[in-house]
Image: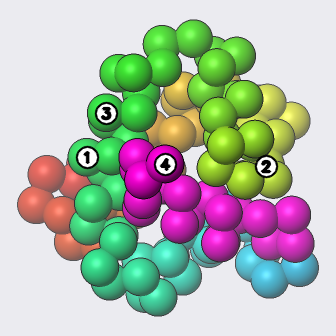
Amino acid sequence: MNDYPALRRFFGAYLHEDWPDEFPDEWAAADEFVRGEPQAAPNFGAEMAQFLRSNPDEVQLQHTLLYDFGAAVMVEDRGWKYRDWLQAMADHIQKAAGHPRAS
C-alpha cells in the first residue's frame, strides 16, 4: 500500500520503537525528518490532512499510527488526543519545511 508515503516514512523511520534513544522528543525527530527527507517533508501536511479526513475515529487513528505506520509513540501518555497531536505534528513539520501555509 502506497497511501501516505511521507507519513509512513516519518512514523516508521523516525518514530520507530528506538526513537527515544535517538531524539530527545518527537519534535526533534520531526526536525530531523525535515532535514533528512527533503522530498517527503513538503508532502507531510497534505497527506496528514487527507489521513485525518479519512479517519474520523480516535481509536482508528491510534491503530493506524501504531500498527500500520509503525510508530512507537503513545501520545495519550503526554496528555494529547491522537487527532490533536497529529495535527500539531503536521503544523510543526510544515513550519519547519517552510511551507507558506504553515501556522
User: Helix, strand, or loop for circle 4?
Assistant: loop
Q: Give the labeled residue for mark 4.
A: 1
Which residue is pictured at 67% across the width and 43% down the height? Answer: 68
Mark 2–mark 3 distance (CA, rounded to whole Å): 21 Å
Tag 3 or tag 4, which sits nearer the N-term? 4
According to the image, what is the colour scheme of the structure?
A: rainbow
Q: Badge 1 is on which residue?
A: 46
Based on the displayed image, in which of its 4 quarters is residue 32 positioned? bottom right
Cα separation, mark 1 vs mark 2, equals 22 Å
Between discs 2 and 4, the one toward the N terminus: 4
Residue 41: image quadrant is bottom left
Q: Which of 68 and 16 is in front in this view?
A: 68
Q: Is residue 97 left or right of residue 20?
A: left
Dot 1: few (<14), some (14–19), or many (≥20) neighbours within 10 Å? Answer: some
Q: Which of marks 4 and 3 is in front?
A: 4
Instruction: Please give the label number shown on residue 50.
Output: 3
What distance separates the C-alpha of mark 1 from that of mark 3? 6 Å
**Residue 90 seen in this snapshot:** no
Whether residues under marks 4 and 1 lie with C-beta atoms below 8 angstroms apart, the answer is: no
Q: Of the two numbered discs 4 and 1 on the same chain, state the one appearing first in sequence.
A: 4
* Pointers 1 and 3 in contact (C-beta within 8 Å): yes
Mark 4, mark 1: which one is toward the viewer? 4
Q: Name the residue under label 2.
A: 73
Residue 5 position within the rendered picture, expressed as x and y whole percent measured from the top left: 42, 59
Check contact, mark 4 vs mark 3: CB within 8 A: no
